[in-house]
Amino acid sequence: MIRLENVSKVYPRAARAALDDITLEVAKGEFVFLVGQSGSGKSTLLRLVLKEERPSSGTIHVAGKELNSLSQWKVPELRRQIGTVFQDFRLLPNKTVTENVAFAMHVLGASVKEVRRAVPEVLELVGLDGYGKRRPNQLSGGEQQRVAIARAFVNQPKILLADEPTGNLDPTTSVGIMKLLDRINRTGTTVVMATHDSGIVDQMRKRVIELDSGCIVRDQVRGVYGYSG
Amino acid sequence: MRARFLASEVGLGLRRNLTLTVAVVVTVAISLALLGVGLLANSQVKVMKDYWYDKIEVSVFLCGNLSESPSCTGGAVTAEQRDAIEGDLRALPVVSTVYYESQAQAFARFKDRFKGSAIAANVTQDQLPDSFRVKLKDPKQFAVVQSAFAGRPGVDSVQDQRAVLEKFFSLLGVLRDGALAIGLISVLTAALLISNTLRIAAFNRRRETGVMRLVGASSFSIQLPFILEGVIASIIGWAISTGLLAALKSLIDTRVAPLLTFTKFFAWSAVWQASGFLLITGFLVSSIASLLTLRKYLRV
């Protein structure tokens, strides 16, 4: 589903490479944690997959497309295959929960009928049944992140990228979000989650890829956050 | 993107930026109206040229007792000379009509024109030359008559009334060019204002456009609401500018035309023609300004 071959990324005027000769493959339906300190290259990797940045060298395949040769006007098509969730939720404050989720469908040309069918379904999936008329400022952090996940998932992407989705949440709430991401993963969606949250990584026992200064230092099936020897 | 969703997004954008929307509408209205005044001035010059050139004549003055030009050394024009000149004038293909004005007719006209003035009392009939009044098929062909008759025995001088009108029209032309230049500059100002307004709108809605990018909306559907906002504001401005031009036209018809009876004014069709041109201008300027701005500030 995602394949990187010898990918390096050097930002202009940066002292060292953000990613240094990375090769990795994430299969369809996998759940992968991307761990490492701030500045280790986790976010850069996610941005490369979204084609928000171009690699300095190497090739990237996402959902069967080779990104270097993908023309700029086909980038939206690529992004429709990918749902994205961030630490800061990025909800639209003057729209209700329903409108926030529906927005992602409307901008892709969905009909009112399709929106009316899909939005309550996905809100139920993320556990926000009955929250449709509220606005983001009336929700807790965990609830806001659920709305963001619902919005990322409502167009049925093949891949879900999550950049520190529990970074602003307390541990109990984080567990709820992880259960939700796990449920989405079980529907066959490939999930790649960048995180510092060692408790969660240890608990979930999924594949862990650790980055340090732009290099992969560990790629472990059913791994933990720190070195377990 | 469905029409209903698009309409609600555009409406939301226009309302949220209401003061800027109003600024764009007013600026577009005034700048298009100024450009329209330039266009109407252009039609007016054309109307006046048609009207006046239709009436002007070339005067071929014949030698009298007092003429001093070299071609009059033989004294006053003889009857044979006069008949020959008239025959040659009628034979010229550029000439439309010719009529003869005798000294008596010239004197009557002169007295009529300077009625009540001391000049009229001091002029006698034999001081005024008789002449041929020649109407040309094309008023610009004056040179043909001039070269054929100036200096010919019995002809004192050849005068073109057009030369007098030309000065007047070149003055009108300067006014028209000035109006057009001011109009164009203010349309450019409106384009810059639209561009800045969209930049602010794009900044205000960076959250929305960010989400659109992430879920894979095409850059066209991200830009379309902004472009439509600019175009709708411009079209409202255009409607107002057409209203202003129509008001100007009816003001001229009711207040100015009764006072200036010596000339005709541009017709309503000129107003609609100018309005159509302004619509195209407004649409092009606003959509080009939008596209250029958004290409810079709303990248996929």
Image (cartoon, rainbow, N blue to C red):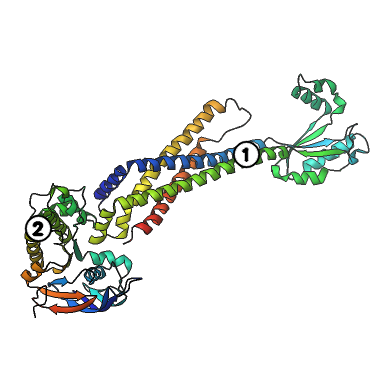
Residue situated in front as seen by the camera: A65 or B103: A65
Residue situated in front as seen by the camera: A101 or A207: A207
Q: Which residue is mark 1?
A: B172
> Callout 1: helix, strand or loop?
helix
Q: Which residue is mark 2?
A: A126
Q: Residue furthest top?
A: B116
Q: Is residue B249 left or right of residue B173?
A: left
Query: A135 above or below B69?
Result: below
User: Is residue A2 in view?
Assistant: no
Res B226 label:
none
In x, y percent, where is residue A149?
14, 59
Q: Residue at x 32, y 44 (%)?
A: B17
**Position of the C terminus of chain B by quadrant:** bottom left
In x, y percent, where is residue B62?
85, 35
Q: Please tell me if label 2 and label 1 are on a single chain.
A: no
Which chain does the residue under circle 1 lie in? B
The residue mark sitting in front, 2 or 1, is 2
In the picture, residue B101 is in which quadrant? top right
Q: Is residue B18 left or right of residue B57?
A: left
Q: CA distance from mark 2 to mark 1?
A: 74 Å
